[in-house]
Every structure is written in structure tokens, then in C-alpha cells.
């Protein structure tokens, strides 16, 4: 069964914008909502004393993972590769939900390692989101706010993992606005979508590390090495794909 697309013309700031809502978009939104609901159900059923009244932070990465998996799966034609992608995607989503379950309890001995894995996955998904926005060739008036919103939401979640007892929205908004300002400049440069997404991803990562160092009043040697190493790799990749 093929579901029809829905189109609508919207006037915004003197521009006539044609919006097309495809069935794939609706399914991705539903998948993200189901992932968020599953994460909340798991957290509220945690046997340890967790903040079960406020679990919004545990929605972010599962929702992003569900959308990322869906974007990949809908591009694969009906074949054995499709079933393999479904199995791998399901395993990844279960792993993300399991990780969110573990980090919900701060005294879990696995918390540090699992939080580190979630952070890496979050930045990977964030860079993938930047790539999807850049590849869609949206106008700057739409692309830049999307970049800002995604950056704010994901960084807010990461700050929850890094320093739970410090206000996060201010720092997340600051990082999101910084990323948005840079996204405006990159939007008009003759760069490939992959190069643009890598630059935005490494800038967001470095901004996160700087804020983390400021809030925690220090940065250790391993973080410095990690930041420099990832920056070099990203810049080499940008130069190769520009």
C-alpha cells in the first residue's frame, strides 16, 4: 500500500513556501516518538531511585537513533541488505535504550563508560543530522534554525551527562547559537555536504569541550589529546571531501 504525499503552500516573510509531507517523514516522526516512549517506560520502571518525574533528557539520543536508522533503512530497496540493516538497526536501538537505562542511575559502576559511549554516539548522530540538513539544500532561513535547534537539544543532553547539578539550558543555548552563526557562513561556501557537516560537528564538539572545561574548572591531558586528534582527523576529512 502506497500512502499519498500531502502538499501545502505557506507564506512566510513574503516568501511562498511549498511544503511536502511524505509518508516517510511521518513514519520517521512516529519511530522517534516510539523510541522516546520506550525510553521513558524503561526509566520509570528502573529498580533504583532515579528521577522518574523528569526523564525528558532520556528521549533525545533514542529519538535521534531511531530517525538515523530510519533514514538509512528507507533508502535500501527490498533485498537481503534491507533485512540486515533492520537487524543491525534494531540491535543499535536496543543498545541505546540499554545505555540510557544504565546512566539513569548515577551510582551504577558502569555509568562512566556508558556515558562516554553515549556521548560519542550523540556526536555521531549530530554530525549525521548536519549532513542531512546540508544535503537537503534548504534555504538558510530554514537550515540554520534547524542546525541551532538540533545543536541545543543534543548539547543539553550531553551536559546532563557531564554535570547533572548545573543549569544546562544557558550553556546549550550558547553552544547552539555559536554553531548557528558558523552554519550561516558555511551555508554560502562552495563546500560539499559532508565537509560542511564535519566542520559543524567538530566545532560543536570543541565548543562542548571548552564549556565542560570552564564548568569543571579544568581539563585533563586525555581530553586535550582527544580534542586535538579528532580535530586533525576531521580537518583532513574536510580537505579530502571539499
Image (tube, rainbow, N blue to C red):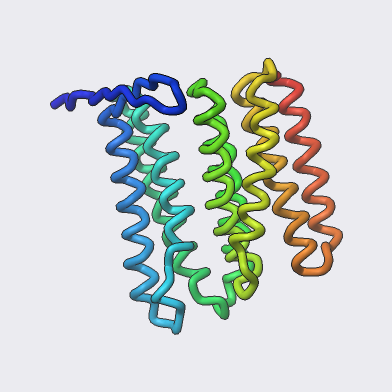
Q: For the view shown, which residue lies furthest in the left direction?
A: 1
Compared to residue 16, the image places residue 86 above or below, namely: below
Residue 143 at x, y percent in the picture: 53, 30
Residue 109 at x, y percent in the picture: 59, 76
The C terminus, quarter of image: top right
Compared to residue 224, the image places residue 115 above or below, namely: below
Residue 202 at x, y percent in the picture: 70, 40
Q: For the view shown, which residue lies furthest in the top direction?
A: 190
> Splitting the image into 4 quarters, where does residue 29 fall?
top left
User: Exactly how many numbered labels are in the figure?
Assistant: 0
Residue 137 at x, y percent in the picture: 51, 21
Q: Residue at the location (77% across, 69% down)?
A: 216
Q: For the view shown, which residue lies furthest in the front direction?
A: 14
Question: In the picture provided, is 74 more to the left or to the right than 202?
Answer: left
Of 190 and 27, the residue lying toward us: 190
> Splitting the image into 4 quarters, where does residue 69 fall?
top left
Q: Residue at the location (30% across, 52% down)?
A: 34
Q: Residue at the location (39% across, 81% down)?
A: 47
Of 234 and 174, the residue lying toward us: 174
Q: Residue at the location (69% across, 19% down)?
A: 189
Compared to residue 1, the image places residue 40 above or below, namely: below
> Splitting the image into 4 quarters, where does residue 110 fall?
bottom right
Amino acid at each position: 500500500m502506497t500512502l499519498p504525499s500531502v502538499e501545502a503552500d505557506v507564506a512566510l516573510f513574503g516568501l511562498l513556501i511549498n511544503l511536502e509531507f511524505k509518508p516517510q517523514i511521518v513514519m520517521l516522526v512516529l519511530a522517534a516518538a516510539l523510541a522516546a516512549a520506550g525510553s521513558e517506560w524503561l526509566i520509570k520502571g528502573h529498580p533504583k531511585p532515579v528521577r522518574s518525574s523528569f526523564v525528558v533528557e532520556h528521549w533525545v539520543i533514542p529519538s535521534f537513533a531511531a530517525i538515523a536508522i530510519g533514514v538509512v533503512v528507507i533508502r535500501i530497496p527490498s533485498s537481503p541488505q534491507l533485512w540486515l540493516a533492520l537487524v543491525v538497526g534494531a540491535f543499535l536501538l536496543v543498545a541505546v535504550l540499554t545505555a540510557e537505562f544504565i546512566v539513569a542511575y548515577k551510582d551504577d559502576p558502569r555509568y562512566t563508560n556508558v556515558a562516554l559511549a553515549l556521548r560519542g554516539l550523540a556526536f555521531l548522530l549530530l554530525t549525521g543530522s548536519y549532513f542531512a540538513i546540508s544535503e537537503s539544500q534548504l534555504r538558510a532561513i530554514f537550515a540554520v534554525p534547524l542546525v541551532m535547534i538540533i545543536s541545543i537539544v543534543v548539547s543539553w543532553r550531553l551536559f546532563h551527562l557531564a554535570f547533572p547539578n548545573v543549569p544546562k539550558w544557558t550553556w546549550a543555548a550558547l553552544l547552539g547559537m555559536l554553531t548557528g552563526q558558523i552554519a550561516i557562513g558555511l551555508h554560502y561556501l562552495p563546500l560539499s555536504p559532508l565537509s560542511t557537516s564535519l566542520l559543524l560537528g567538530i566545532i560543536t564538539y570543541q565548543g562542548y569541550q571548552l564549556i565542560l572545561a570552564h564548568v569543571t574548572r579544568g581539563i585533563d591531558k586525555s581530553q586535550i589529546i582527544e580534542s586535538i586528534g579528532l580535530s586533525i582527523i576531521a580537518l583532513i576529512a574536510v580537505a579530502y571531501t571539499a
